[in-house]
Amino acid sequence: MFPYIHLFNHSFTTFYFMIAVAIMTSAIYVIWQAHRRHLYIWHMIATCVIASLSGLIGMRVFHILVEAPTYYLEHPSSVWNISNGGFVSWGAIIGLLVGTIAYLKIFKLSIRNYWDTLALGFPIIFFFVRIGCLGTGCCYGKPTDLPIYVVFTDISTPAAQIYPGIAIHAVQLYSIIHSIIMFILLVIIARKQTFRGQIVCSFLILYGIFRFIEELFRGDIARGVYFNFISTGIIMSCFAILFGIIGTIRFHSAN
C-alpha cells in the first residue's frame, strides 16, 4: 500500500505518523470533552500525556511478553528496536489504564469520570492507527473470495511477504469502519449517560465484540494463535466484554 508518507521533502513511516496523528487528534477531542463535562482541564491534559506514554509502553511490552517472548530472550537488544514494528493495541489499553489509575489516585480525582472522557477518544485512536496498519500492511487478513478485498504487492510490507499479490480480507478497513460506528455509539451513550463509568464500560463491550469478529478474518498468525483458531485477540476480546459487563453492573448499582 503506502508504507511511507512524504511531506515537506521528508519521508515518514506511515504507521508511526498515524500514531502521532491519532494521539494528537484524540487528545484535542478529549480535552474539549473534559471542558464540556466540567473536569479539570490541566489534569485532563496530564492524563492524556500519561495515557499516551503508558499506552505506547504497554503496546511494546505486550508484544514482547505475549507475541514473541522467545525471540526477545534470544535477542535482548531487539527490545529497543522499534523500526520494524512490534506493537499491540491490547497492550495500549492495559498500559494506559494502569498509568492513568496511578495518576488519578495520586491526585484523588474521579477515575470513572476521567476514564469516561478518555474512552470517548479511543475510537479516534483506533481509526487513525488502522489507517497506518493499512498503509504499512500489518494486522492483515486471510485470503478471501469476497468482492471486497485488498492486495499487497510491496514486498516490504508484512502482508505481501506472506500473501504476495493475493486477495485478502480488508481487515484494517473493517476496523476503520467499526471505529466510526463505535465513536457514534459512544457519543450517543454519553448523551444519555446515567452513571459514572458507563462510557468506558460500553467501550470495552463494543470494542470486545467488534474485535472478536475482526479476529475471525485475521491472517497474521504471528500475533499468537492457539489450537489453530483461538488468537490472543479473541481471548482478550472475551476479557474486555466480561470486564465491561461486570463494570456496568457494579458501577450502575454503585450509583
Image: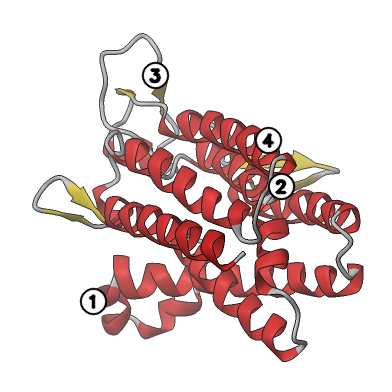
Would you say residue 86 is visible in this rendering? no
- Check residue 70 in the rendering and tell me which mark sits there, or answer none: 1
User: Left of 81 or right of it: where is 167?
Assistant: left
Q: Are marks 2 and 4 in contact (CB under 8 Å)?
A: no
Residue 4 point in image, percent of width and height: 63, 42
- The disc, 3 or 4, on the residue closer to the chain's N-terminal end is 3
The amino acid on which the numbered mark 2 sits, given as a three-letter code, is Ser
- The disc, 1 or 2, on the residue closer to the chain's N-terminal end is 2
- The disc, 3 or 1, on the residue closer to the chain's N-terminal end is 1
- Check residue 26 in the rendering and tell me which mark sits there, or answer none: none
- The single residue placed furthest to the bottom in the displayed view is 106
Front residue of this view, candidates 67 and 72: 67
The amino acid on which the numbered mark 1 sits, given as a three-letter code, is Thr
Residue 118 point in image, percent of width and height: 69, 59
Q: Which residue is mark 3?
A: 149
Alpha carbons under labels 4 and 1: distance apart? 44 Å
- The disc, 3 or 2, on the residue closer to the chain's N-terminal end is 2
Alpha carbons under labels 3 and 1: distance apart? 34 Å
